Image (cartoon, rainbow, N blue to C red):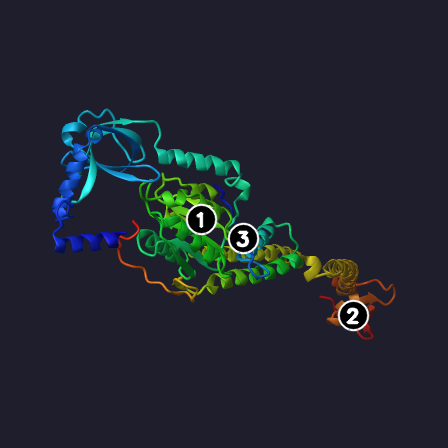
Amino acid sequence: MPNLRRTFWLTNQWNCGDGVSTPSIFSVAALTLKIKQLLEQDAKLRQVLVRGEISNFKHHSSGHMYFTLKDQSSRLKCVMFRSRTGRLQFSPEDGMTVIADGSVSVYERNGEYQLYVDNLQPEGQGALHLAFEQLKNKLRDEGLFDPQRKRPIPFLPRRVGIVTSPTGAAVRDILSVLDRRFPDVPVLIAPAVVQGSDGPASVVRALARLNARSDLDVVIVARGGGSLEELWTFNDEQVARAVAQSRLPVISGVGHETDFTIVDFVADYRAPTPSAAAEIAVPEKSALQESIGTLQSRAQAALGGIVRVRTDRLESLLVRPAFTRPLDKAVQWQQRVDELVSMAQRAAQRSLDSREERFRGIVGKMESLSPLATLARGYAICRTAKTSEVVKDAAQVRPGTALRVRLHKGELACRVEASE
Amino acid sequence: MGENREDVTSNDDLSFEGALQRLEEIVRQLESGDVGLEESLNLFEKGVGLAKVCSGKLEEAEKRVEVLLEGDGEPQPFNVAGRSAANR
């Protein structure tokens, strides 16, 4: 049809037909202006109430507010000028559902139609929030959030899979943390679109590709921080189900600490950020090495202790006389006996000796006292021949008396010649 | 949110964490002082073996950071792109 129309007006141009309106070639500005006028002429658009959810909210330094109102199917750019914002009784935020009161026109410079907002009123929860709650309840009721469903995260994975955007901070942060904790762990990235309408299918496919492999033990699903709209891929039902059904355990690391997506509830482990997910995925290699070393030391020390206790005991037994000199007692007794015997002998001997000595002493004395000993010394015993009276005094005898003189050897018959 | 860190045995008989746990058990037994000399020597020997297994597993990994491309080709080495505005 368009081709026919074009042909029609081309030929019409050449024909310069009258009475038929001739389409003109607009300049961009002109067309834009026409659109603007069209919109502004419509009374219904001059004061209109719109319900939608705020997203991409920016409070410009000029004081003007720029945001988008959206629902599930469509988006509307909005501006609220500073002159109007003073009326606000609340602080507009992304995710809030509001009723906007304003007029529709065109910002010619950008060729965008906009709602020029005069006033904003909040209305309960944002639509996206509502959708979030609804899906959350549905999947929870199906049991997909049950703690028992959650698989344990492998302690030491052979290889870590990551579903994320290949550009951006999330993948960089994850690789950096993995490298710090366990420098040689192998990694496989399945790149995915992580926002926008292409996001869900892309993430589902990436996860499937990783699950099809046999060399992975864990998967991290990650995306950096963003608005509810930007994270919406991870609130998608198909994505949530894919994570729930994943053969490999899934660690979710989506957004910031305070962001909770459906994928977070369904994953086997929820980490507050992509970096935290990497911390969960691998252990700290140096800490493990240290543990092993410590355990070995403890084992050696314990064994050493056990052996030492026994050698001490053994040694203390071995030094006892019973071992070193087992005959000691007997020998001691023997020795004692010998000693006693000797003592007895000696005592007997001494006794004998002393008697003998006394005897000899007496004998000796007797001998020395014996007249025979005196005679041996040269003395003689003089007796009267007649009476054998011993003569001790010369006056005892008159000359001429017969004497008998006993010498040491023999006797003499003598006569006294004179006494003096 | 589940928080289990357990061990997954791939094709090995004894996984890293299994070996480490067994090693800890052995050390506790040795330290308890309830074990006789003969048994202690046996346990110690087992412990040394387990420590070797653990260390071995830590060193097994070979660093490879790869990315899957479109199509079903083999993964390619991955270079972290510079700061990119895409997808953020």
Residue A284 in view in this figure: no
Pointer 1 chain: A
On the image, the x and y values in percent for residue A108 come to: 14, 42
Cα distance in 3D space between marks 1 and 2: 163 Å
Tell me which amino acid carries mark 3: Asp
> At 31% from the left edge and 41% from the top edge, which residue is drawn?
A227
Classify residue B19 as left or right of residue A219. right
Within-10-Å neighbours for mark 1: few <14, some 14–19, many 20+ = many
Quadrant occupied by the C terminus of chain A: bottom right
- Residue B7 - label: 3
Q: Which residue is mark 2?
A: A416
Whether pointer 3 and pointer 1 mark residues with C-beta atoms closer than 8 Å, the reply is no
On the image, the x and y values in percent for residue A130 come to: 39, 33
Within-10-Å neighbours for mark 2: few <14, some 14–19, many 20+ = few
**Same chain shared by disc 1 and disc 2:** yes
- Residue A251 - label: 1
**Label 3 secondary element:** loop
Within-10-Å neighbours for mark 3: few <14, some 14–19, many 20+ = some
Asked where in the image residue A326 lies, by quadrant, the reply is bottom right
On the image, the x and y values in percent for residue A212 come to: 50, 59
Classify residue A289 as left or right of residue A354. left
In the image, residue A400 above or below residue A157: below
Nearest-to-viewer mark from 1 and 2 = 1
In the image, residue A328 above or below residue A275: below
Residue A163 in view in this figure: yes
> At 39% from the left edge and 39% from the top edge, which residue is drawn?
A260
